[in-house]
Amino acid sequence: MGRAPCCDKTSVKRGPWSPEEDELLRSYVQNHGTGGNWIALPHKAGLNRCGKSCRLRWLNYLRPDIKHGGYTEQEDRIICSLYNSIGSRWSIIASKLPGRTDNDVKNYWNTKLKKKAIAMNQQQQDYYHHQRGSGGRGRRGAPQTQCASMHPSPASASSAVTTASPGDAACSFGPMFSSPTPLQAQAVLARYDGAATAPLPPLQQQHQASSLAQFSSAPPPQPAGASIINSWAGGLAIDDMFLPELLGVGDFPPGDLFGGGFAPLLQDRASSLQELAACYFPNAQAAEVWAAADHVKPPAAGLCHSLT
DNA sequence: AAGGTACGCAACCGCGCTGGC
DNA sequence: CGCCAGCGCGGTTGCGTACCT
């Protein structure tokens, strides 16, 4: 037996909204608010629509502060960085972009940004192979490609797999990465947020120290031919993985990072790192609580407030 | 100019979570 | 404590339009 539908789909209108319906919904919400009950709202507003449909229409289209299109390079970078770090949690990513909705960000990623990232990855791989082929020393540690940075965490692995097209082979989003463990995330947070945060309990300090040591250690030797992709477990810290993209700096070849046109927006590396860490947890204590709860994903509430 | 194809986006679907009872 | 209605989210679908042949 399946889940009961939220409304009688045979008796409510579906499909595109008419301007009249938009106006009805807009005026009702502006005058009365949602009343905390979207299911009852369409009846009160005189709309022959499902409550969920009304909610979606309002949140994604009618809300007064909504922006459509015209994504800036800064927004691109925020999306890419957050996608890399937390996966396809569009509502969280969208919450960092004023005026953007999760649906909008999701569509933008799926239709434009992902291709951009894939193209850049290919460019970087070509560059890397060229460097190796020409006997260059290569870059510090294992080469970090845009592709690597574009791999979502396993939190989104399933969706990433389903949305990847066959043509994505050059950057096949797959479950290649293991997420940072809660303690690792905490360690990363503490690494950049340390001075301003309260000391951890002794046991947590011990765990954090070992986690940090593991997390921050140099990557193990990469087997030939398998060196492109690094993993959390391989020793890449958050900043190593995608901070250069966010900052638009680092030892990346010219021309990468979406054409290299991203001027550094965050000049101060330390504060940038803190902002990124804050995308995971509001503070070290929150990270600790989360770690103690052994959650798989960072908590949805309170994320990334520093970027808003 | 017409038909086919690709793309972008709005909307829908269904599941997990949460809070009230 | 369990149930259930409602909410919120991510994934998917389908339609309109732009572009190509």
Image (cartoon, coloured by chain):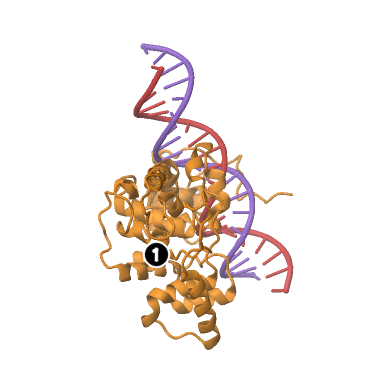
Chain colours: A orange, B purple, C red
Find the residue positioned furthest to the front.
A135
Q: Residue at x 32, y 71 (%)?
A: A270
Which residue ends up furthest to the bottom in the rendered image? A202
Q: Is residue A134 placed above or below A303 in the rendered structure?
A: above
Q: What x and y, as percent, mark residue B8?
A: 39, 38
The secondary element bearing badge 1 is classed as: helix
Residue at figure coordinates x 38%, y 74% from the top left: A192
* Disc 1 chain ID: A
Instruction: Specify whether A238 is left or right of A203.
Output: left
Q: Which of A144 and A288 is in front in this view?
A: A144
Which percent across, then down, holds residue A247? 31, 60
Q: Is residue A64 visible?
A: no
In this rendering, would B19 be left or right of A90? right
Q: Which amino acid does label 1 sit on?
A: Asp
Relative to A200, does residue A242 appear above or below in the rendering? Answer: above
- Residue A147 in the image: state x and y as whole percent: 44, 49
Q: Can residue A74 be seen in this view?
A: yes
Pick the residue in front: C19 or A85. Answer: A85
Quadrant in which the C terminus of chain A appears: bottom left
Say how many tags the image has: 1
Closer to the camera in the image, A13 or A231: A231
In this picture, is A289 found above or below A110? below
**At x 26% / y 59%, what residue is drawn?**
A265
Question: Residue A50: horizontal and vertical position, in percent?
Answer: 54, 47
Front residue of A140 and A69: A140
In the picture of the structure, the residue carrying the numbered disc 1 is A239
From the viewer's perspective, is A306 left or right of A171? left
At label 1, counting other C-alpha atoms closer than 10 Å, the crowd grade (few under 14, some 14-19, many 20 or more) is some
The residue under the point 46% across, 54% down is: A90
